[in-house]
Amino acid sequence: MLISRLVTHFEEEAGRMLAFAGFTDVDLHALSKSVSIENRRISDGDKNGDFYRKGKVGEYWEVVQDEKIRRHVEQTLQWGKIGNPILRRIYSSYLPWSVQRRAKLWS
Amino acid sequence: MNDSQGAAPRSDTYRYWFFPGAQRVGTHFQINTMMDALRQKNISFVQRPGNTLEASDLEKFRTNLAKLAEGPETHILVNFHWRTRQERDFLLSYPNALCFLIWRDFRDALVSYYHFLIKRRQRMFHDFAHFYWTEGYAFLWRQSIHQQTWFEIGNHPCVFHADFPSGNPF
Protein backbone atom coordinates (compact mmCIF):
# COMPACT_ATOMS: atom_id res chain seq x y z
CA MET A 1 0.00 0.00 0.00
CA LEU A 2 1.48 3.30 -1.01
CA ILE A 3 1.05 5.97 1.58
CA SER A 4 3.45 8.72 2.29
CA ARG A 5 5.72 8.36 5.28
CA LEU A 6 5.10 12.04 5.84
CA VAL A 7 1.83 10.86 7.33
CA THR A 8 2.90 7.64 9.03
CA HIS A 9 6.37 8.71 10.25
CA PHE A 10 6.02 12.46 10.36
CA GLU A 11 9.08 13.57 12.29
CA GLU A 12 11.48 11.32 10.41
CA GLU A 13 10.14 12.20 6.99
CA ALA A 14 9.63 15.91 7.65
CA GLY A 15 13.21 16.01 8.90
CA ARG A 16 14.42 14.52 5.63
CA MET A 17 12.31 16.91 3.62
CA LEU A 18 13.58 19.91 5.54
CA ALA A 19 17.15 18.69 5.31
CA PHE A 20 16.67 18.44 1.57
CA ALA A 21 15.66 22.10 1.62
CA GLY A 22 18.69 22.97 3.72
CA PHE A 23 17.17 23.13 7.21
CA THR A 24 18.44 20.82 9.91
CA ASP A 25 17.56 22.45 13.22
CA VAL A 26 13.77 22.57 13.19
CA ASP A 27 11.73 21.48 16.20
CA LEU A 28 9.96 18.57 14.53
CA HIS A 29 7.82 17.71 17.52
CA ALA A 30 6.38 21.23 17.61
CA LEU A 31 5.97 21.07 13.86
CA SER A 32 4.00 17.82 14.09
CA LYS A 33 1.57 19.53 16.47
CA SER A 34 1.17 22.65 14.39
CA VAL A 35 0.35 20.76 11.18
CA SER A 36 -1.96 18.23 12.79
CA ILE A 37 -5.34 17.93 11.14
CA GLU A 38 -7.11 19.02 14.32
CA ASN A 39 -4.99 22.18 14.50
CA ARG A 40 -5.57 22.95 10.83
CA ARG A 41 -9.31 22.63 11.20
CA ILE A 42 -9.23 25.21 13.97
CA SER A 43 -6.81 27.63 12.30
CA ASP A 44 -8.56 27.46 8.91
CA GLY A 45 -12.12 27.52 10.26
CA ASP A 46 -12.90 24.07 8.89
CA LYS A 47 -14.81 22.81 11.91
CA ASN A 48 -16.74 20.16 9.97
CA GLY A 49 -13.63 18.79 8.33
CA ASP A 50 -14.88 19.50 4.84
CA PHE A 51 -11.41 20.31 3.57
CA TYR A 52 -9.19 18.61 6.13
CA ARG A 53 -11.04 15.33 5.99
CA LYS A 54 -9.50 12.46 7.88
CA GLY A 55 -9.11 9.74 5.29
CA LYS A 56 -7.52 6.41 5.96
CA VAL A 57 -5.33 3.89 4.26
CA GLY A 58 -7.32 1.33 2.34
CA GLU A 59 -10.53 3.34 2.47
CA TYR A 60 -11.10 2.52 -1.17
CA TRP A 61 -11.57 -1.18 -0.44
CA GLU A 62 -14.33 -0.34 2.03
CA VAL A 63 -16.12 2.18 -0.17
CA VAL A 64 -15.86 0.41 -3.51
CA GLN A 65 -17.46 -3.01 -3.55
CA ASP A 66 -18.46 -3.00 -7.22
CA GLU A 67 -16.26 -5.52 -9.07
CA LYS A 68 -16.76 -3.80 -12.40
CA ILE A 69 -15.40 -0.53 -11.01
CA ARG A 70 -12.53 -2.29 -9.30
CA ARG A 71 -11.50 -3.99 -12.55
CA HIS A 72 -11.74 -0.71 -14.43
CA VAL A 73 -9.66 1.10 -11.81
CA GLU A 74 -6.88 -1.50 -12.03
CA GLN A 75 -6.94 -1.39 -15.82
CA THR A 76 -6.77 2.40 -15.86
CA LEU A 77 -3.87 2.44 -13.43
CA GLN A 78 -1.99 0.02 -15.66
CA TRP A 79 -2.66 2.02 -18.80
CA GLY A 80 -1.68 5.23 -17.06
CA LYS A 81 1.83 3.87 -16.57
CA ILE A 82 2.44 3.87 -20.29
CA GLY A 83 5.02 6.52 -21.06
CA ASN A 84 4.61 6.75 -24.82
CA PRO A 85 2.01 9.47 -25.48
CA ILE A 86 0.85 7.84 -28.72
CA LEU A 87 0.17 4.52 -26.99
CA ARG A 88 -1.49 6.42 -24.17
CA ARG A 89 -3.75 8.02 -26.76
CA ILE A 90 -4.70 4.62 -28.18
CA TYR A 91 -5.44 3.07 -24.80
CA SER A 92 -7.44 6.08 -23.71
CA SER A 93 -9.45 6.30 -26.92
CA TYR A 94 -12.63 5.41 -25.07
CA LEU A 95 -12.37 8.63 -23.09
CA PRO A 96 -14.37 11.61 -24.31
CA TRP A 97 -12.18 14.23 -25.98
CA SER A 98 -12.92 16.76 -23.26
CA VAL A 99 -11.56 14.34 -20.67
CA GLN A 100 -8.46 13.67 -22.75
CA ARG A 101 -7.77 17.37 -22.96
CA ARG A 102 -8.17 17.83 -19.22
CA ALA A 103 -5.86 14.91 -18.54
CA LYS A 104 -3.37 16.41 -21.04
CA LEU A 105 -2.63 12.97 -22.42
CA TRP A 106 -0.69 14.39 -25.35
CA SER A 107 1.81 16.51 -23.45
CA MET B 1 13.99 6.95 -1.43
CA ASN B 2 16.64 8.05 -3.86
CA ASP B 3 20.04 8.66 -2.34
CA SER B 4 20.58 11.93 -4.15
CA GLN B 5 17.94 13.43 -1.89
CA GLY B 6 20.42 13.23 0.94
CA ALA B 7 22.54 15.92 -0.70
CA ALA B 8 20.96 18.93 0.94
CA PRO B 9 21.08 22.08 -1.11
CA ARG B 10 21.60 25.42 0.59
CA SER B 11 18.21 26.90 1.44
CA ASP B 12 19.26 30.45 0.63
CA THR B 13 20.24 29.52 -2.91
CA TYR B 14 16.91 27.85 -3.67
CA ARG B 15 14.37 30.62 -3.56
CA TYR B 16 11.50 28.95 -5.38
CA TRP B 17 9.80 25.98 -3.79
CA PHE B 18 7.29 24.34 -6.09
CA PHE B 19 4.75 21.78 -4.88
CA PRO B 20 3.50 20.06 -8.01
CA GLY B 21 1.72 17.17 -6.29
CA ALA B 22 -1.30 15.43 -7.75
CA GLN B 23 -4.84 16.09 -6.56
CA ARG B 24 -5.98 14.75 -3.18
CA VAL B 25 -2.66 13.21 -2.19
CA GLY B 26 -1.63 15.50 0.66
CA THR B 27 -0.01 18.45 -1.08
CA HIS B 28 -1.57 20.90 1.36
CA PHE B 29 -0.25 18.88 4.25
CA GLN B 30 3.20 18.98 2.71
CA ILE B 31 3.16 22.70 1.99
CA ASN B 32 1.76 23.46 5.45
CA THR B 33 4.65 21.52 6.94
CA MET B 34 7.17 23.59 5.03
CA MET B 35 5.43 26.88 5.81
CA ASP B 36 5.27 26.14 9.51
CA ALA B 37 8.96 25.22 9.47
CA LEU B 38 9.79 28.56 7.83
CA ARG B 39 7.66 30.37 10.43
CA GLN B 40 9.48 28.54 13.18
CA LYS B 41 12.79 29.75 11.74
CA ASN B 42 11.47 33.31 11.27
CA ILE B 43 12.25 33.15 7.57
CA SER B 44 10.14 35.37 5.36
CA PHE B 45 8.19 33.70 2.60
CA VAL B 46 5.20 34.17 0.39
CA GLN B 47 2.89 31.34 -0.64
CA ARG B 48 0.46 31.42 -3.55
CA PRO B 49 -1.78 28.76 -5.10
CA GLY B 50 -0.76 28.32 -8.71
CA ASN B 51 -4.13 29.34 -10.11
CA THR B 52 -3.66 32.86 -8.73
CA LEU B 53 -0.50 33.07 -10.84
CA GLU B 54 -2.11 31.53 -13.94
CA ALA B 55 0.09 28.48 -13.57
CA SER B 56 -1.59 26.55 -16.37
CA ASP B 57 -0.20 29.06 -18.87
CA LEU B 58 3.54 28.81 -18.45
CA GLU B 59 4.46 32.13 -20.05
CA LYS B 60 1.95 34.02 -17.94
CA PHE B 61 3.12 32.10 -14.93
CA ARG B 62 6.74 33.05 -15.61
CA THR B 63 5.74 36.72 -15.75
CA ASN B 64 3.60 36.56 -12.63
CA LEU B 65 6.26 34.71 -10.71
CA ALA B 66 8.85 37.30 -11.70
CA LYS B 67 6.57 40.03 -10.33
CA LEU B 68 6.13 38.10 -7.11
CA ALA B 69 9.88 37.70 -6.86
CA GLU B 70 10.30 41.47 -6.73
CA GLY B 71 9.01 41.32 -3.16
CA PRO B 72 11.29 41.16 -0.13
CA GLU B 73 10.50 37.57 0.86
CA THR B 74 13.39 35.16 0.72
CA HIS B 75 11.30 32.15 -0.29
CA ILE B 76 8.42 31.79 -2.73
CA LEU B 77 6.18 28.74 -2.40
CA VAL B 78 3.73 27.81 -5.13
CA ASN B 79 1.45 24.78 -5.30
CA PHE B 80 -0.28 23.62 -8.43
CA HIS B 81 -1.05 20.24 -10.03
CA TRP B 82 1.59 20.44 -12.75
CA ARG B 83 1.42 17.08 -14.45
CA THR B 84 2.81 17.31 -17.98
CA ARG B 85 6.37 16.85 -19.16
CA GLN B 86 6.38 20.37 -20.52
CA GLU B 87 5.34 21.79 -17.15
CA ARG B 88 7.84 19.62 -15.28
CA ASP B 89 10.70 20.68 -17.51
CA PHE B 90 9.64 24.29 -17.16
CA LEU B 91 9.79 24.12 -13.35
CA LEU B 92 13.14 22.36 -13.40
CA SER B 93 14.54 24.96 -15.77
CA TYR B 94 14.65 27.41 -12.87
CA PRO B 95 18.20 27.17 -11.52
CA ASN B 96 17.14 28.17 -8.02
CA ALA B 97 14.04 25.99 -7.59
CA LEU B 98 13.18 22.86 -5.65
CA CYS B 99 10.17 20.64 -6.29
CA PHE B 100 8.45 18.73 -3.48
CA LEU B 101 6.10 15.87 -4.27
CA ILE B 102 4.06 13.59 -2.11
CA TRP B 103 2.35 10.37 -3.16
CA ARG B 104 -0.56 8.35 -1.95
CA ASP B 105 -2.36 5.28 -3.20
CA PHE B 106 -4.44 6.51 -6.13
CA ARG B 107 -7.38 4.38 -5.05
CA ASP B 108 -7.60 6.23 -1.74
CA ALA B 109 -7.09 9.54 -3.54
CA LEU B 110 -10.06 8.58 -5.71
CA VAL B 111 -12.27 8.17 -2.63
CA SER B 112 -10.94 11.45 -1.25
CA TYR B 113 -11.82 13.17 -4.53
CA TYR B 114 -15.35 11.76 -4.30
CA HIS B 115 -15.83 13.34 -0.87
CA PHE B 116 -14.09 16.52 -1.98
CA LEU B 117 -16.51 17.07 -4.88
CA ILE B 118 -19.52 16.48 -2.66
CA LYS B 119 -18.39 18.59 0.29
CA ARG B 120 -16.38 21.34 -1.34
CA ARG B 121 -17.87 21.57 -4.81
CA GLN B 122 -21.45 20.77 -3.82
CA ARG B 123 -21.66 18.09 -6.49
CA MET B 124 -24.48 15.55 -6.28
CA PHE B 125 -23.97 11.87 -7.05
CA HIS B 126 -26.44 9.02 -6.69
CA ASP B 127 -23.64 6.81 -5.39
CA PHE B 128 -19.95 6.09 -5.87
CA ALA B 129 -20.60 4.33 -9.18
CA HIS B 130 -22.29 7.45 -10.54
CA PHE B 131 -19.27 9.50 -9.48
CA TYR B 132 -16.82 7.01 -10.95
CA TRP B 133 -18.37 6.74 -14.38
CA THR B 134 -18.79 10.50 -14.73
CA GLU B 135 -15.68 11.90 -13.02
CA GLY B 136 -13.63 9.27 -11.26
CA TYR B 137 -12.15 7.44 -14.24
CA ALA B 138 -10.78 10.70 -15.70
CA PHE B 139 -9.34 11.60 -12.30
CA LEU B 140 -7.46 8.30 -12.28
CA TRP B 141 -6.01 9.01 -15.71
CA ARG B 142 -4.78 12.38 -14.52
CA GLN B 143 -3.22 10.79 -11.43
CA SER B 144 -1.45 8.13 -13.46
CA ILE B 145 -0.04 10.62 -15.91
CA HIS B 146 1.06 12.81 -13.05
CA GLN B 147 3.01 9.95 -11.54
CA GLN B 148 4.46 8.88 -14.87
CA THR B 149 5.66 12.40 -15.62
CA TRP B 150 7.51 12.81 -12.35
CA PHE B 151 8.82 9.25 -12.03
CA GLU B 152 10.29 9.02 -15.49
CA ILE B 153 13.08 11.49 -14.61
CA GLY B 154 14.23 9.18 -11.79
CA ASN B 155 16.57 10.71 -9.23
CA HIS B 156 16.74 14.42 -9.78
CA PRO B 157 18.81 16.56 -7.40
CA CYS B 158 16.11 19.23 -7.18
CA VAL B 159 13.10 16.94 -6.71
CA PHE B 160 12.02 15.51 -3.38
CA HIS B 161 9.51 12.67 -3.20
CA ALA B 162 7.90 12.00 0.16
CA ASP B 163 8.99 8.45 0.84
CA PHE B 164 7.30 5.15 0.17
CA PRO B 165 7.51 2.48 2.85
CA SER B 166 6.63 -0.22 0.37
CA GLY B 167 9.74 0.09 -1.72
CA ASN B 168 11.77 2.34 -3.92
CA PRO B 169 9.63 3.53 -6.82
CA PHE B 170 12.66 4.13 -8.99
Image: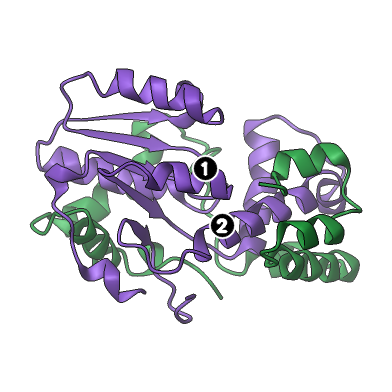
Residue B19, how many percent across, how many down?
41, 45
Residue B159, how many percent across, how many down?
36, 57
Q: Amino acid at mark 1?
A: Glu
Q: Residue at horizontal 31%, vertical 17%?
A: B67
Q: Which residue is mark 2?
A: B149
Asked if one can make out residue A70 in the rendered structure from this viewpoint, the answer is yes
Quadrant of the image occupied by residue A24: bottom left
Sequence order check: which comes first, mark 2 or mark 1?
A: 1
Q: How many angstroms separate mark 2 from mark 1 (CA)?
A: 10 Å
Residue A89, how many percent across, how many down?
81, 55
Q: Amino acid at mark 2?
A: Thr
Q: Which residue is mark 1?
A: B87
Cβ–Cβ below 8 Å for labels 2 and 1?
A: yes
Q: Residue at horizontal 87%, vertical 66%?
A: A66
**Horizontal side of residue B89 vs B114, given as left or right:** left
Q: Residue at horizontal 23%, vertical 59%?
A: A20
Point out the image quarter for the N terminus of chain A.
bottom right
Tell me, by letter, which chain the rendering colours green: A
Q: Secondary structure at mark 1?
A: helix
Tell me, by letter, which chain the rendering colours purple: B
- Residue, far bottom: B167
